[in-house]
Amino acid sequence: MSEENKNCRHVAIIMDGNGRWAKAQGKPRTAGHLAGADNVRTIAIAASNLGVEYLTLYAFSTENWKRSADEVNYIMKLPSFFFGKYMKEFIDRGFRMHMLGELDRLPAETRKVLDDAVEQSKQNTGLNLSIAINYGSQREILLAAKHYAEDVAEGKASLDLSEEQFESYLMTAGMPNVDLLIRTSGELRISNYLLWQIAYAELEFVPEAWPEFTPEVLARCIDQFNNRDRRFGGIKDE
Ligand code: FPP
């Protein structure tokens, strides 16, 4: 881990603005998603070099099914393009892939590509790169509550539940909570992303659209994070 970045272990990004970026250039929205997918590689490498241990990216929300069938179909084909092009490099770099979301609702071919990426990288110990796809945080918390209730009913869990124990039922089980949440393209919303995990996160909203979010902008966000005074509800030492 870089000396300058001791505390920013988990960065989550809401990758917004692909469509507007493409439109501004007279291109179809799908061109923005393609450029956005390429930028996932660029930013994952940058994050790893900056000492980030967990990078968690919002690729497709449970609400995104409302988009046109053409756009949804295009986004569902992106993982095949993306991992076909970059998986070998990710393995060489030691990246470990994780998926967050209800993958069983995805097209079978998309799901296979995602499952393969997780399986092929499961021995790796470098950057943990998580893609949230068909993900919604309220649904994640609801499913966690259901699983916990089932465990209680079956005598596998007690009613005395701590925050840490509940976290083991979330899709991010085993990961630290988010330190820094970034949203691109100037929107000031959380959009049902990692609601539990961002409880104490620092927030950065940047004007750049996702395809133009560069390693330099990421480094600036992390610098700002490291210069902030995080108190987790306490008070600063005198
Ligand atoms: C938000 O921009 C972006 C999305 C809904 C899709 C994001 C997907 C990628 C970046 C590619 C995913 C990569 C992999 C590896 C699966 P928007 O379309 O909402 O932009 P707008 O607000 O300008 O319309």
Image (cartoon, rainbow, N blue to C red):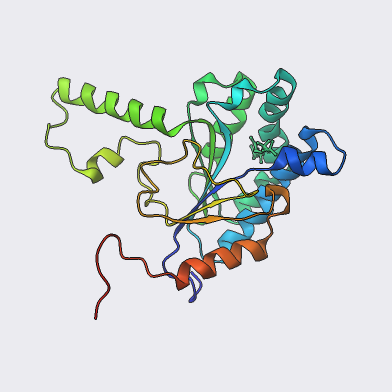
Q: Foreground residue, 124 or 41?
A: 41
* Residue 172 left/right relative to 164: right
Name the one closer to the observer, 178 or 235: 235
User: What residue is shown at x 48% (from left), y 48% (from top)?
Assistant: 123
- Relative depth, front residue between 208 and 12: 208
Image quarter for residue 206?
Answer: bottom right
The residue at the far right in this view is 26
Q: Is residue 97 above or below residue 237?
A: above
Residue 154: x %, y % from top left: 16, 21
Looking at the rendered image, the quarter that the C terminus falls into is bottom left
Q: Quadrant of residue 230?
A: bottom left
Residue lying at 74% horizontally and 40% vertically, measured from the top left: 20
Q: How many dots with numbers?
A: 0
Q: Position of residue 37 (x, y in %)?
A: 70, 42
Q: What residue appears at the point 66 percent right and 23 percent down from the top-left corner?
A: 67
User: Where does residue 232 sit, x and y in percent of width and height?
Assistant: 30, 60
What is the x, y in percent for residue 102?
48, 26
Q: Quadrant of ligand 1?
A: top right
